Image (cartoon, rainbow, N blue to C red):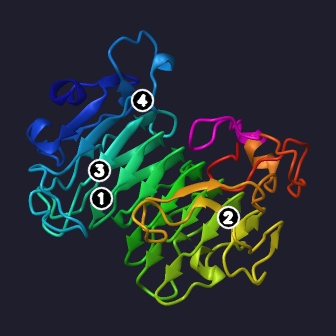
Amino acid sequence: MTHSLVDADLQTHYWLLAGQYTADELGEPHPSGGNFRLLIGASLHGGFDGSETSIEERDLTVNRTVLSGDVLGDDLPNYSNRADNLGRLFYSNTYSELRDVTLTQLDGIDFVHFGGPSGVGNGGTAILLEAQHRALIQDCRFSENWAGSSLVVASSLEVARTAWTSNRGLLMNQNGYGLASLCIENSSFLANVAKYRLVVGEGWAPMELVNLTVVANRVYQPTWSLFVQDEVMDGASMSVQNCIFWRNASGGSTSEAVHSSANALAATPPDIGWSCIDQWTGTTASTGVIAVDPRFVDAVGPDGIPFSGDEDLGLTPGSPCIDAGNNEPILSAGIELDLARSARRLDDPTVLDTGNGTAPIVDMGALERR
């Protein structure tokens, strides 16, 4: 990997064998920062057992590829004992005239235990990917990383079917212009902590949040939201559809404003619809929004502590979020799979359809009830 990624050509795909790889196995840091320099168009796909002849044959449930930043394998609970942890893994500052059409991809990979208060390489910045072009992250898991700066930075960013659990710091920062955008769909955010915000979009980019489950996250700074569209110009919009926001907090507040907001320069307020939002009062214009318990499968988890990061955020029978979403963004984007890579838009005959569109109606949240 060390040599091939440095010399990668456009649209080069690398298949990574399942298993766990730790930072000390990943080679010497690249001079520009990070262990690997991902050139524009280089894509990493995990989850292979070595017998596949096509990417469709891999089994991401059985075979996971894990990249760990814990060099010595000695991390302790509560983000402690992290002096040896790798701060930055990938770095890509390649400029190209194809930057708006060519993707760098991270696909089917778990990123765990990167960063810390004094992490190796970049003092705990934990930039897993820094790219000055388009990036696609799908079917990945980010767990127990510490981002002094941010976990992922890209000019234009697409995220699909990705779980963010028990991370610390800014998770995503989209900071591009022109054709840039930030789209996150069918993903979960559970028990993450940040000082100011979890996800931020900047510049002229629209922000689209579709079928997210966002539970028990918090930011310490009062009045800040988890998802923020900042420095908005030229009428760029923020859309929130089919999402579940539950038990999140900003400072000591748990109000509806905690969840998403647009900068004062935005031409229009966030477009929020067909979602389940804790503490919702209807102050922000919306359609189809409810504020009742989504009824998760397990809101406590094996450790016995509610919303600590090991919970099952699927929907139980009779949940008010079943068949209650909006089909339009799902159909227009051609979204067919949920976070578990199972089919979207499954009808539950025991629940009255309360969403928008022709049955079957999509559920709210990242996981379709089945």
Lower position in the chain sequence, tag 2 or tag 4: 4
* Residue denoted by label 4: 62
Per the rendering, the mark at residue 112 is 3
In-image side of 9 versus 122 (left or right): right
In the rendered structure, does residue 40 fall within the stretch colored magenta? Answer: no
Lower position in the chain sequence, tag 2 or tag 1: 1
* Residue denoted by label 2: 295
Mark 3 element type? strand
Residue 97 shows up from this direction:
no
The quadrant where residue 257 appears? bottom right
> Label 1 crowding class (10 Å Cα cut-off): few <14, some 14-19, many 20+?
many
Mark 1 element type? loop
**Which residue is painted at 53% across and 50% down in the image?**
180
* Residue denoted by label 1: 145
> Label 2 crowding class (10 Å Cα cut-off): few <14, some 14-19, many 20+?
some
The quadrant where residue 20 appears? top left
- Report the magenta residues as a range: 331-345
Q: Please tell me whether mark 2 or mark 1 is closer to you in this view.
A: 2
Image height check: is 264 above or below 153? below
> Label 3 crowding class (10 Å Cα cut-off): few <14, some 14-19, many 20+?
many
Of the residues shown, which amino acid type is indicated by label 3?
A: Val
Position of the C terminus by quadrant: top right
In-image side of 317 versus 66 (left or right): right
Lower position in the chain sequence, tag 1 or tag 4: 4
43 or 84, nearer to the observer: 84
